[in-house]
Image (cartoon, rainbow, N blue to C red):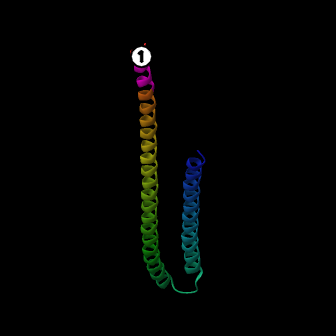
């Protein structure tokens, strides 16, 4: 019983840590975007040059965001695969335990039936 709850808590903790890291990454990207935008808007240069710089920074940020999202999706898929594998392994272990209990019950029942037959035939 202790192992089952421990595994669930471990999975929950891993998922919480992963989500916390994801939130940190999202905050970092948002902060970078806001900082870059403010810096460009307050820069002492012409509007044309500023707009060009904003477009370039926007493309760069879009590329960085796409890469970060791709990495995050890959991490989520890997975590989902790990969770699925763990669940599958636990299911197989439970099925085996159930089969072992059933086999043990059959053996005990067979002993009782044999003893009953012996008593009936011996009387």
Instruction: Tell me which corner region of the image, top left, top right, bottom left or bottom right, holds residue 119.
Output: top left
Q: Toward the viewer: 53 or 77? A: 77
Q: Toward the viewer: 102 or 34? A: 102
* 101 displayed left or right of 34: left
Which residue bears the numbered disc 1? 122
**Residue that lies at the very extreme toward the top in this rendered image:** 123
When the figure is inspected, residue 76 is found, relative to residue 58, above or below; the finding is above
- Secondary structure of the residue carrying numbered label 1: helix
Q: Position of residue 21 (x, y in %)?
A: 57, 65
Is 100 a magenta residue?
Answer: no
Residue at the (44%, 40%) spot, across then down: 100
Instruction: Tell me which corner region of the image, top left, top right, bottom left or bottom right, holds residue 96.
Output: top left
Q: Toward the viewer: 74 or 102? A: 102
Magenta range: 112-120
In which quadrant is the C terminus drawn? top left
When the figure is inspected, residue 103 is found, relative to residue 38, above or below; the finding is above
Residue at the (56%, 50%) spot, across then down: 8
**Residue that lies at the very extreme toward the front in this rendered image:** 122
Residue at the (55%, 52%) spot, across then down: 7
Q: Position of residue 80 (x, y in %)?
A: 44, 56
């Amino acid at each position: 019983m202790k192992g089952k709850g421990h595994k669930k808590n471990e999975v929950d903790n891993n998922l919480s840590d992963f989500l916390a890291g994801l939130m940190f990454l999202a905050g970092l990207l948002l902060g970078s975007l806001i900082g870059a935008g403010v810096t460009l808007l307050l820069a002492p240069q012409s509007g044309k040059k500023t707009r060009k710089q904003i477009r370039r920074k926007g493309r760069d940020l879009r590329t960085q965001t796409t890469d970060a999202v791709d990495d995050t999706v890959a991490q989520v898929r890997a975590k989902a695969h790990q969770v699925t594998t763990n669940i599958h392994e636990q299911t197989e272990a439970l099925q085996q335990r159930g089969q072992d209990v059933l086999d043990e019950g059959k053996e005990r029942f067979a002993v009782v039936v044999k003893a009953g037959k012996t008593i009936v035939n011996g009387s």
